[in-house]
């Protein structure tokens, strides 16, 4: 069933697990995640990048995702990931998202706060949850950040904005890592204790399993996977026989590859059975 992000993060908090958030790009990636969630009886978050909401993709894909989530046997949130503008947020609200992220992390602290206060007011008025970001989570190809989100700033940010979840910088980045990152687990625990809010780990693709578990134990309640969703699908596409001409048949194995990947992460995060 379609539900809000905050409800799922409350389940994660009660269980001591994290909810996986999978970036989806088309019907096949979405179906792979949905099939995995239903098999594992797991709560999940389906999310799409900002760029899809400011082009035609989200306009056509969103109704299908909303319908699929409403029909699903498990709880699913539909989320805007890294909303780069207020326009992207407005479109996400119109297209049925049950949570939105407005990424103003590259702005100075006070400007980030002002942007998020405005977005929280807008979204909460229509019953939609909000994720913010404090400290900029960059690209793995540019190197893993070593300046982590400050505890005092995180506490002030949550209090001033009223966000429902906070993405923090603790040693991960977006994309494929040149070498495995080292997560600042102590900083996660400090921020979790200071803010009392659900914390989000971006750049989950490629993070070693033991570090994922440690991050969850310290207080991470949502972990994003995007790059490895793409690789799961594309690697299977490259191995599929070119003699298969019917696109629906050709895409069956790539869809199953995404399902296998999603199942692996659902179990790693402790989310299997979270819908029961």
Image (tube, rainbow, N blue to C red):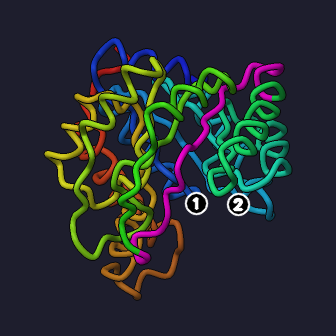
Percent position of residue 106, x then y: 64, 57
Give the image location of residue 93, x and y in percent: 80, 36
The N terminus - image quarter: top right
Q: Say which quarter of the image contains residue 237.
A: bottom left
Q: Find the magenta span and give its range.
A: 123-142
Q: Residue at 71% across / 46% down in the picture?
A: 62
Q: Position of residue 260 (x, y in %)?
A: 28, 52
Q: Residue 224's mark?
A: none
Name above or below for residue 208 compared with residue 198: below
Q: How many numbered marks, from 0 up?
A: 2
Please give the residue where the numbered disc 1 appears in the rendered image. 25
32 left or right of 70 in image = left
Check whether the beta carbons of the residues at disc 2 and disc 1 lie within 8 A of each other. yes
133 is within the stretch colored magenta: yes
The part of the image, by quadrant, that contains residue 123 is top right
- The C terminus is located in which quarter? top left
């Amino acid at each position: 069933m379609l539900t809000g992000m905050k409800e799922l993060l409350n389940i994660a908090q009660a269980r001591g697990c994290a909810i996986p958030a999978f970036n989806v790009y088309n019907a096949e990636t979405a179906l792979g995640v949905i099939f995995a969630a239903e098999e594992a009886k797991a709560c999940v978050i389906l999310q799409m990048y900002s760029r899809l909401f400011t082009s035609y993709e989200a306009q056509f894909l969103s109704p299908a995702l909303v319908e699929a989530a409403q029909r699903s046997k498990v709880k699913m949130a539909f989320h805007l990931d890294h909303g780069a503008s207020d326009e992207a947020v407005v479109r996400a609200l119109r297209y049925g998202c049950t949570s939105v992220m407005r990424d103003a992390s590259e702005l100075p602290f006070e400007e980030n706060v002002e942007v998020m206060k405005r977005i929280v007011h807008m979204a909460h008025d229509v019953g939609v949850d909000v994720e913010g970001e404090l400290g900029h989570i960059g690209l793995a190809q540019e190197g893993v950040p070593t300046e982590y989100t400050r505890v005092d700033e995180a506490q002030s940010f949550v209090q001033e904005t009223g966000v429902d979840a906070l993405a923090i910088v603790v040693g991960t980045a977006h994309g494929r890592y040149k070498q495995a990152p080292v997560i600042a687990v102590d900083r996660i625990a400090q921020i979790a204790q200071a803010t009392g809010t659900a914390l989000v780990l971006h750049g989950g693709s490629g993070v070693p399993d033991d570090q994922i578990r440690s991050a969850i134990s310290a207080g991470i309640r949502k972990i994003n996977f995007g790059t490895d969703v793409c690789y799961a699908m594309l690697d299977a596409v490259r191995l599929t026989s070119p003699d298969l001409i019917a696109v629906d048949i050709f895409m069956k194995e790539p869809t199953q590859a995404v399902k296998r990947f999603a199942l692996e992460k659902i179990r790693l995060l402790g989310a299997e059975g979270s819908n029961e």
